[in-house]
Every structure is written in structure tokens, then in C-alpha cells.
Image (spheres, helix red, strand yellow):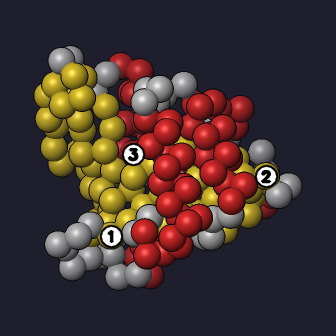
Amino acid sequence: MDSKNVIFRTYITPADVEHVREIISSSGFFYDFEIPVAVELAQDGVNEGEKCGYFFVFAEIDGKAIAYSCYGHIAGTDAGYDLYWIATHDSLRGTGIGKLLLEKTEQIVKEKGARYLIAETSTIDKYLPTRLFYEKNNYENEAHIRDFYKPGDGKVIYVKRLV
């Protein structure tokens, strides 16, 4: 994959609702009940625009969305942001697109005045690549909540300081 072929955009289109479904479904990392949540956030972005509080970055190759992130300001903080979703279509995992997408998302939130970006993920073995991805991209493991999602499936909270 040549990173010069990747184009980023920060707006969402009606077609992106299905792109989100396809990207999330292809990954094999998310529970079945999580897919409609990701799709609903995308639909909210289409219907309400920025006032919904969810912001998106899409990575495209040849006009097709192949990865995306969804982020938003954390209410009650002066400059905290949550990374709600970041996913690359499974056919392109390991190509560096996720890293580029994460860097682009960090750049955007930093321009919005963010001091930090928070990412959360599961502690089960299946999510080891996700945890390593955050760690390789200079996110610090700030918290671990045992049995968060269900018994044996905890949550790890990663933080990247942007200033």
C-alpha cells in the first residue's frame, strides 16, 4: 500500500453509513451488538452534522472509504477528547493506514485545542493487537478496569497527551 494513495476527509456522507457498517463488520473485532452502535453514530453525523457531537475522519483509496475514526469532545472537560472508534477494513489491516488515520485524527483534535485523546479497548487476548497499536503510537495505559464488559473481559484506558 502506497500511503500517497490515501486521502483523508473530515465530512460524512450518507454513503458512509454503509461504509462504516462494512468496515466494522469486516474487522472481526467487534461484538455483533456494537455494529449497530457504530452505524447509528454515523447516521447521527449525517442527520445532525456537527451538533450531534460526533466527528469523523475517513481514509479513502480511489474514492472508497476503507478506514475511519470517530471522536468527540468529552463533556465537562476543557480540552479532553474521546476516540470512540477507529477501524480499518480487514483487507487492509497491517498496511499502515490505521497509523496514518490515528495521526490525522490526533492532528485534528490538537488543532481544536485538545490536550489529550483517550482510547479504550478490551483486555481479552483477541485485542492484544489493538493494545499494541496504541502503545506503539505513544498512548499510555492509564487504567484497567477488570470485568468491565463481562466477567473476564476488562477495559484498558489509553491516553495520549497532545501538548
Percent position (x, y) of residue 114? Answer: 33, 75
Using the image, tell me which numbered label, if any, was put on residue 73.
1
Of pointers 1 and 2, the one earlier in the residue sequence: 2
Of pointers 3 and 2, the one earlier in the residue sequence: 2
Q: Which residue is mark 2?
A: 64
Task: Give the crowd class for mark 1: few <14, some 14-19, many >=20 residues within 10 Å.
Answer: some
**Residue at horizontal 18%, vertical 31%?**
148
Circle nearer the viewer, 3 or 2:
2
Percent position (x, y) of residue 29? Answer: 48, 28
Judged left or right of residue 11, residue 122 is: left
| Whole-number angstrom distance, CA of label 1 to CA of label 2 | 27 Å
Q: Which residue is mark 3?
A: 134
Of pointers 3 and 1, the one earlier in the residue sequence: 1
Q: Is residue 33 visible?
A: yes
Q: Is residue 36 above or below residue 86?
A: above
| Whole-number angstrom distance, CA of label 3 to CA of label 2 | 25 Å
